Image (spheres, rainbow, N blue to C red):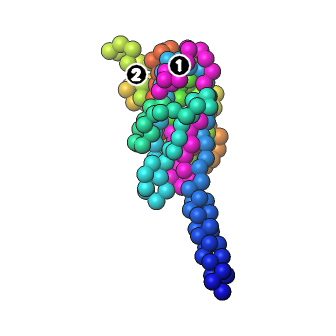
């Protein structure tokens, strides 16, 4: 009888551990490109049930980084990996399922891993407009020169600090594919404020 009771208790304990493990399952978000001397800036989210933060680990080319990831925004210091400019980079960001408000981490400056002057955002329409910081070159000149949405130039005013790409006015259907291209001055990167607008 005692043996059977002990087996039941052990089985219940193992079930609890397995259930907890299932609730804490992680996924991996991958960003690839070339090292350009810039760090990646990541927007983090809160963990499941609002406890802790979403990101659990970051790796650069297979090696775990020592970056401080417990914050709403953090950087992945690519220079700490001893990389040379132009070298291929693969960044893996492990995160918990069930995070909020963002379900997965967001790269604020995805163009940090490209050495050209075009930033491309691809995804699906999620009933939001896209907002972008447009850096100054001079007092009157801005970095972004042209914006294309699904290959067509948009008439958004580009001589402004913040650009609003009015996807809501373009008659997209929910979850329809969207490709947005920003042509800008090399080395003066625009910054996407809400890339979750295209999921």
**Residue 102 in sight from this viewpoint:** no
Q: Mark 2 points at which residue?
A: 135
- Taking 63 as reference, is 171 above or below it? below
Q: Please state the total of marks drawn on the protein image.
A: 2
* Left or right, 38 with reference to 17: left
- Residue at the spot 55% in from the left edge and 18% down from the top edge: 83
Q: In which quarter of the image is the C terminus?
A: top right
- Residue at the spot 49% in from the left edge and 21% down from the top edge: 79
- Residue at the spot 35% in from the left edge and 13% down from the top edge: 138
- Taking 171 as reference, is 115 above or below it? above
- Residue at the spot 60% in from the left edge and 40% down from the top edge: 29
* Viewer-closest of 130 and 186: 186
Q: Which disc number belongs to residue 82?
A: 1
* Viewer-closest of 63 and 147: 63
Identify the magenta region. 77-106
Secondary-structure class at tag 2: loop
Q: Residues within 10 Å of mark 2 (few under 14, many from 20)?
A: many
């Amino acid at each position: 009888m005692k043996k059977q009771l002990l087996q039941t208790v052990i089985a219940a304990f193992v079930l609890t551990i397995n259930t907890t493990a299932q609730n804490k399952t992680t996924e991996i978000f991958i960003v690839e490109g070339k090292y350009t001397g810039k760090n990646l800036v990541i927007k983090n989210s809160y963990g499941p049930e609002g406890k802790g933060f979403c990101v659990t680990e970051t790796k650069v080319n297979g090696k775990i980084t020592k970056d401080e990831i417990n914050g709403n925004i953090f950087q992945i210091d690519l220079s700490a990996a001893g990389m040379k400019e132009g070298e291929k980079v693969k960044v893996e960001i492990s995160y918990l399922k069930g995070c909020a408000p963002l379900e997965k981490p967001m790269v604020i400056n995805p163009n940090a891993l490209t050495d050209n002057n075009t930033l491309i955002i691809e995804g699906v329409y999620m009933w939001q407009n896209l907002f972008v910081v447009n850096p100054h070159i001079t007092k009157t000149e801005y970095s972004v020169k042209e914006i294309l949405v699904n290959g067509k130039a948009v008439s958004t005013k580009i001589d402004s600090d913040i650009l609003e790409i009015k996807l809501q006015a373009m008659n997209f259907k929910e979850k329809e594919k969207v490709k947005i291209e920003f042509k800008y001055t090399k080395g003066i990167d625009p910054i996407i404020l809400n890339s979750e607008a295209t999921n």
